Amino acid sequence: MQQYSVITENLNKSFDVDSVLKNLDLKIIKGEIMAIVGPSGCGKTTTLRLIAGFEQPDKGKIILGDTIVADEKTFLPPEKRGVGMVFQDFALFPHLTVAENISFGIKSKDKEKIREEVDSLLELVALNNLGDRFPHELSGGQRQRVSLARALAPKPDLILMDEPFSNIDADTRLIIREEVRKILKKLKTTAIFVTHDQEEALFMGDRLAVMNEGELEQIGTPENVFQQPKSRFVAEFMGNTDFIPGVISKKGIKTEIGELEQRINLPIGTKIDIAVRFDDLKLKKSKKPNAIVLARHFKGSMNIYRLQLPSGNILHAYAKHTKTIELGKFVKVKLDPGHDLACFIGEKAL
Amino acid sequence: MKTKRPSLKSVFVLWIPSILITLGILLPLIYLVIRAYDANIDAWSLLLKSSTIKTLGRTVWLAVWVTLFSILVALPLAWLTTRSDIPFKRMWAILTPLPLVIPSYVGAYLLVSMLGPRGMVQQWLEGSLGISRLPEIYGFPGALYILTVLSFPFILLSIRSSLQRVDPSLEEASRSLGNNAWQTFWKVIFPQLKPAILTGSLLVVLYVLRDFGAVSIMRYNTFTRVIYIQYQSSFDRSTAAILSLVLVSLTIIILIIKQVSQNRAIIERSDSKNTRPPPIIPLGKWRWPALIFCSSIVIVTLIIPGSNLIYWVLRGVQAGEKIGNLWEATQNSILASGLAAVLILIAAIPIAIISVRYPNKLSGMIERTTYLSFALPGIVVALALVFFGSNYVSALYQSLPLLLFAYLVLFLPEAVGSVKTSLQQINPNLEEAARSLGSQPFRVFQKITFPLVRPGLVAGFGLVFLTTMKELSATLILSPIGYKTLAIGVWDAVSEAFFARAAAPALLIILISSVPLALMTFRKERKY
Amino acid sequence: MKYLYVIFTKLPKTLRNSFKIFPLLLIFTFQVFLSSCVSNDIETQESLIIYSGRSESLVGPIIESFIESTGIQVDVRYGGTAELAATLLEEGDSSPADLFFAQDPGGLGAVAEQGMLSALPEDMLSLVDPRFIDPSGNWVGISGRARVIVYNTDTLSPEDLPTDLQGFTDPKWKGKIGLPPTNTSFQTMLTGMREIWGEAETKLWLEGILENDPVYYEKNTPTVAAVAAGEVEVGFVNHYYLYRFLAEEGESFSARNYFLPSGGPGSLILVSAIGVIESSDNFENAEKFIQFLLSNEAQQYFANETFEYPLIEGISIPANLPPIENLNSVNISLGDLVDLDGTIKMLQEVEMLP
């Protein structure tokens, strides 16, 4: 049997009349990093705050380890849950130094021991000589690391992170999140990580939970969620996806831009939608073109072309960075995924 | 680019007006120096007399204790009325700062009539319980009590607005690190409140220094009372001036202390993008003690004095006492206080802007200078303006403009403080963003800055309005001749022991100045 | 129609934008500025400006009847005598005041010392007992107040009280005496005491009183109130405050006056007084006003309404007020009691004043 660090059962929460969380069931395995991802307002932050104890659920149960921390009868205040939290705005105490911030949650009375622990945490987050600084003297990335060290200091069973990298410059963000992931893995800490950035979620999470409008859409490994989205929403949200209509044929699926050899157990003639990612397409100059180039996004290492098909459908396709096609030119676009594509009838995946 | 070099335009729009206003505020000091220059050696030797030094000590002692007690009362009240789920929260929020509107001489008279050696409470105790003597209220305890009751709202208001701005995630961080609400308050929130407590305390300390009404009725000799005695008994303006200069020096020392301790409490607002309102903490079983605390404060500071006044009015009406026509005095009071509040706000804006947007030595100096006259007894400021007004601008002497100017000199810091606090909350990027969109600076002020500082302006207006309503010394001497105000009405009746006649205008002062105070409390409840 | 609707819906928003009210307020302020300046300018020669240290509740009505009977416009600035004296001293020659009506001659003396009072005509001064005018003729007394002992009728009867002030240094009065040390009348009494008894004796008396832990009050009124309430048993005050209380509280008010039978400084008669400001160009009307205050009508008013002693002959006094002739008052000119400074110094020496 799996050992769970967090279990939420049938969790419900609404503010005034807005229901922000509907019947959320979530199980987080001990030692994993769970990335909760979704657009703003999807309920991911509320989930985090309910687990931390900053909000009280309207209905449902939260279990941390073996302890029920919230249900109809119980409500354990945040300070008794042993949960570390890293805030979006870091929430460092402005009147305390870095070292004092970090030692804030350490319960020990032994000054020498506290100093040692703070020192080792400073080393862990690579801020060795900054213990005497005040938060406002640090850069965004440094504050982030202090914030993590502070949350780790009481050795919590669970770390919650609420959009922790959104206040950091783009160029340092990549480095910081790599470091944070390394630290969490080294300490084998269970962590729940909330973000609206699917790329970040894919990188950080051992597993991903995609939420939308207060409900859990899909949960699984990054690869699983990315490659086999369970719903149109997930496919769209995880990014770089266009949809084109297709019809089940003898060989597979017939589309505007050619036939796809993919077996689907549906009667011939059934109409479906296919999720097509940028890299599932191949672009060619051809005498028999089937698309017009509307726009080119030069990304440095590659080009992304926006194409319009005769039916009016829009597709995006990658091309080499050396391959420059002028706007308004006609091209031929072809499906070339090399793997099965996700297909949908209505909102649901097949 | 937080500290900018002043542009040419800002020099004309902000710096020159600020400097002119500051020079105006310095007039009383110039006057004091002129008068002190006349003094003979006898008067100067007074400074070294042990009784003078003792009085100074007593004054500081009183100010310190009033401030401590005010913090003690204000801190829990501020927290309960902003952050807890106490029942009738809004009602408490509006009622608790109201004692600020009671003139100190009225408050002191009421206290004596209630708790004095032969006051109502004493008589009731004697009748029912046979207790023959309440503890002495005259002297230190009475002065401490009455001044605390009348000035704690300065700190209360200041803490309240600061509490509403504390970043809620700081609290959550502390909670998640294992501290309960109580520990979190002391370890995390209280340190953030320090600047607000300091600002409020400064107003309280200076209020105590300049108060005459309460200390004279309570017979506690503070420096201000000694200054008054110099005028009253020996018509000795030179000695009074020397003593007043001591008070000014004391103010400078207090300002320095405040400056230094503020440096130590490093407060940099964390760059939070959090706009969540701070969380409300359920009181649970503390609900009842909290309710009892709030209601006893309101009963002691407001209900008892208020009903006492109503009792006097009713008694007077019953005895056929003519209350007289208060309509004219009411109009005059509202007009003078309203105009003064608007004028003082206008004067406060440039000073507040330069001290927030261009923090440097000069702007800091200008801001602190506004406090210098704030600790001076009203009579001193009034006589200074008599001196300059009658001799140099006789056309304006004893006219409404000069009276308003006197109010400006006396009460400017209250407005500067309020405007400054709300300016500090505005991200300068907003203003720059507006500028980059091509707006003229004045338009920026009108469209961006003004709406955002409006809560501060409302608060400043309320504070100045009610202090001006109570003001007596300068009003008596500098108002246009025959100009009656409610405060003058109270004074005239009280000085001849017509208590019933004094009660009606006193009640009116309290009622009228409650309106802007309630409005500003109400406004603060809403968030931008 | 649609236009009207648009205007109607937009209007409250415009009004709510209080920023636009600011310029209006500025204009309004400016207008008030202007109007108050103008009203200063049109003060006619016919109007009188009085600085009155006596409160409006007491002298307001009699000033009204002066205006009615003479048609001369009078504007009064009420305030404390000391504050007004200080104001006059600051104003110097630019003072707008024509007259200074003071609670006591002390304030007038301070102003006169700077040469700011004009000499009054002899025929006016002669109306009043020479004890109650300024020897150099700069001010004239208007109404008299006798120094008395006010006592609590629940605990004391007149027989319990000593015949002169010396009696109160007896230890049996410990904690029972109330007095207002900052009050000018009290201080003038001490100045008289220094004149009559001499410096040493006065200081000794003060020290004797201090031995008895007197309770200090802010001024006369609270002293009387405290005696009636039993806070203290006797108080050193002027006579007329008691009658004010009797009028308001009725006969049950438990304090009465005791006029010291053996005379001395405890039986001094003090006055409120008035003088004309030197810089006034309205001497004629000012003189008319003083004459009016010394007329039968005004003197009768003071006797009936403020319970003070009239200073001219032939005025009837309320029945409960002992006639001035019956008081064993000392024959000392108030003009001689100008050395208030010396008294203050002595009070500070014995630490009755800070």
Image: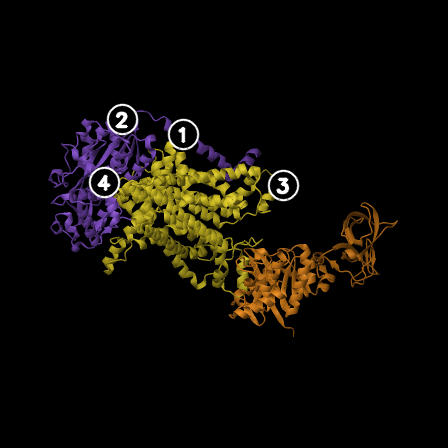
Secondary structure state at the residue bearing disc 1: helix
Label 3 – label 4 distance at C-alpha: 74 Å
Q: Amino acid at mark 1?
A: Ser
Quadrant in which the N terminus of chain A appears: bottom right
Residue depth check, mark 4 versus mark 2: number of the one nearer the observer: 4
Count up the numbered dots: 4
- Colour of chain A in the image: orange
Write down the chain letter for disc 1.
Answer: C
Give me the C-alpha separation between circle 1 and circle 2.
28 Å
**Mark 2 = which residue?**
C283
Query: Tag 2, which secondary structure?
Result: helix
Of the image marks 4 and 1, the number of the one nearer the N terminus? 1
Q: Is residue A52 above or below residue C117?
A: below
Query: In 3D space, how far apart are the residues under numbered discs 4 and 1 (Cα atoms)?
Result: 45 Å
- Secondary structure, mark 3, is loop
Q: Which residue is mark 1?
A: C35
Q: Tell me if residue B496 comes above or below residue C172 in the rendering.
A: above
* Viewer-side label of 1, 2: 2
Q: Position of residue B370 (x, y in %)?
A: 44, 43
**Residue at x-position 48% and y-position 43%:** B366
State the hue of chain B: yellow
- Tell me the tag on residue B390: none
In front here: C160 or C10? C160
Residue tagged 4: C339
* Residue position for label 3: B437
Is residue B220 visible to the viewer in this orientation of the structure?
Answer: no
Amino acid tagged 2 = Phe
Asked whether, in this view, residue A65 is left or right of residue B369, the answer is: right
